[in-house]
Amino acid sequence: MKNALKNSSPAPFYEGIQYFGDTWPDYVQYAGTAAIKQGHHAISDPSDQAAAYQTLLMADALRYLTLQVCGSKGSGHPGGFASSADAYAALVMLGHTNIITEVGHHAPGFYSAMFLDGSLEAMDIFTVTDMMERFREQHGLLGHLSGAIPGLLAPAGPLGQGQHFAMAGALLHPDTLFPFTLGDGGMGEPYILSAMMHFNTAYPATTNFLPTLVWNGYSQEHHSMVSRMTNEEMTAYWTGHGFKNVVLIDAKDFDDADQDGAYVDSSRFSFKQRIAFSQAVLEGVDRAAQLALGGTLTCFIIKQLKGAGVHAAGSKSHNLYPTDTLDSEHISSALKRRAISAESWELVRENFIRAGGGRAVDTVVTEHERPLPALGDLPFTEFDKSKKAVPSTAMGALVGAVGKADPSYVVTNADGNEASAMKNINDALKIRHPTPDPLYNQEPDGQVYEPLNEDACAGLAGGLALFGSRAIWLSYESFAINGWPVIQTVGQAMAELRRTTPSVVTMFTAGALEQGRNGWTHQRPEIENYFAAMMRNGNAYPLFPCDANAIQVAYDYATNSSNKVMTIIASKSPLPIRMTLNEAHHAMKTGAATIYESESGDKGTVVFAVTGDMIFLPVFEAKNQLEAQGYKVRIVAVVNPRQLYRESDVLWSTVTGGENNFMPDDAFNALFDGDLLLAVSGGPSAPLEPVLLRTRAAKRDVICWKRGETTATPSEIMDFNGITAETMCERAAMLIG
């Protein structure tokens, strides 16, 4: 064992490796040439011992690099990936490189793979030294996965999301396998398997995603909750969720080191048994992959101790602390155990670069923009200002038109489109269900996906958008919080991408003011504060169309945008028309527009800045009373509040496709100057923050949602919250009377 020497420029990619090891036994026989031949995408025979030998070499290279990179910062998570390294290497050697992970803590292992295949050269990481310098640093390799890292398909951080990206990829690319690694700690998130079960029921022919369970007995800080299961019980758990084949490789079956417990470390086996285990994993992964690609829902499980082959075992291997440096004895000794020779590093890289047809940055599906069918002009309906119309129904007609023009378009909804006055979507696109039934608009090839789980709805819609397809998630505002973390993750990923992809579009109906008799369970608009906070990201746009014309414009605006999070909030009740289509187009582009202004008034000017649609009913009542008292009133519909921020308030310049088209001061002041500004919302006040920040009005106040209660009518719930014409008039009299 010897310290690595820094080579003269240009340095080899392995410059910076702290230790090199001796050549393995029988190296010339089994590693004299790369198992993936020149011009090939994968090994030719998974039963070939040379292939197993080189798969094990790749796994140890991944373990070594993962640990050294984490040790260079005394930070990061090596243990979980270490127990998956054999399966990851097998997938690569078999040419399946569109690999996703459920586990953000596996990031350093995935970065090691992208380094070894050369993908990280796209971000000027050429050597191990470069990689260590950029690990867990700004503009480098962040602590948890991002889809912006060259060669990686999707983000990973919050548990319970990886399967959505894999299923979205499988749906869009039916001839490609999308494995995703899943930790047994994260499998405690119960909707992971139920989401896959529902997806398989709806899309039975789409089986080309491969859950790869890393069953290592531990989660982040303790034993995993499934650690006591037997192999038979774990198999039954997966078959009970619709998986027809479960391929389970248990390291315990190969142990010749007399290790205690159900979970063992394969790196402690004799060299002969290490090769045997590698062979079994390689053949098992190949069998599982062929089944999945052949139309059979399949999972692969690798069972071995967490931390296999690194500095510690179990949860103690999970993450490093500042004292866990490269100089620490337990880190350096682990690196020495896993060290391989310089020629072995060269061989590993050669296999990596050939696997899957080339570097991941050049070959995985998300590194290329997906062509989209043209939509043409959407069939807008112009509603007259003298009429009433249902906003959600007006939008539904356009959703149907987009789905007809784009066969890959998917609409997701957990609580039913019909309940949100959007039956026209189901009429046009049909609910995807194995049981045909015209009464319920059910067809096996429908484009409306309806799992009773908001996470599954948000996950598939968000995953499809991230992978390059149009989609929309429809929900009740009150339930959206159950799926929003996926959209937040996708939105952040879109902000960082090096390519263009359709925005993730959502629309939430049945807001607080409409759901009186259902009570507070259906009156939870506080999520709008979440949307509002995300506006400062630079690519998040909550939209508040004020009527059935404006919602059509909002949907068109969102659907034809890219790399953004577009969230539409609207009602399902018949409401007055406040804007023409042309007026709505202008308001959506600029952020807001005046929808009413008094001709005169000698007591002062009251300006209403309003987000919502139904909330305009009490605002216009207040307008009548204030005018009768001698006030001049201006009512401004704030339809796109992100445009009303100051340029410096938003990180627009840091995101892909960032836009700085904020409303200029003169236009803003023309809308909101007055003696009193009343910011009014049927939901919380946060979406109106940009108005409150910029207004020059000396006196201002907020009238908004407080909390829910069971009521018979919208007016009663507004009264309960103090969102009434009387309250508005009293505030005006108090502040400027």
Image: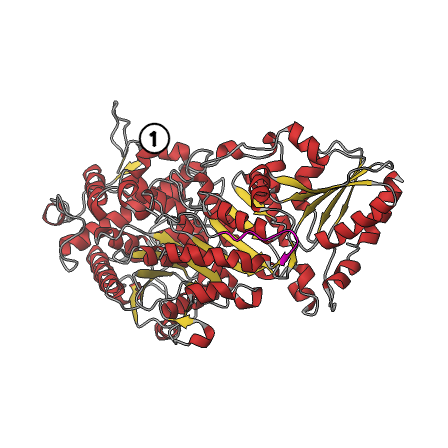
Q: Please tell me whether residue 87 is drawn above or below residue 734 in the rendered image.
A: below
In this picture, residue 217 sits left or right of residue 688: left
| Residue name at image x 72 percent, y 34 percent | 695
Visible residue check, residue 414: no
**381 inside magenta stretch:** yes
Q: Is residue 93 left or right of residue 649?
A: left
Residue 727 on the magenta span: no
In the depicted structure, whether residue 595 falls above or below residue 410: above
Q: Nearer the viewer, residue 9 or 29?
A: 9
Up the image or down, 89 lies above or below 413; here it is above
Q: Main secondary structure of the magenta part?
A: loop
Rendered image quadrant of residue 404: bottom left
Point out the image quarter for the N terminus: top left
Viewer-proximal residue, 266 or 300? 300
Q: Position of residue 508 (x, y in %)?
A: 57, 57
362 in relation to 439, above or below: above
x and y, in percent, of residue 51 in the image: 16, 53
**Disc 1: which residue:** 124
Residue extent of the magenta highlight: 380-388
Residue 365 horizontal/vertical position (percent): 31, 48
Residue 52 showing in the rendered view? yes
Task: Report which quarter residue 393 is drawn in.
Answer: bottom right
- Direction from residue 359 to residue 452 in the image, left or right: right
Q: As shown in the figure, which amino acid type bears the numbered disc 1?
A: Asp
- Name, please, the residue furthest toward the top: 8
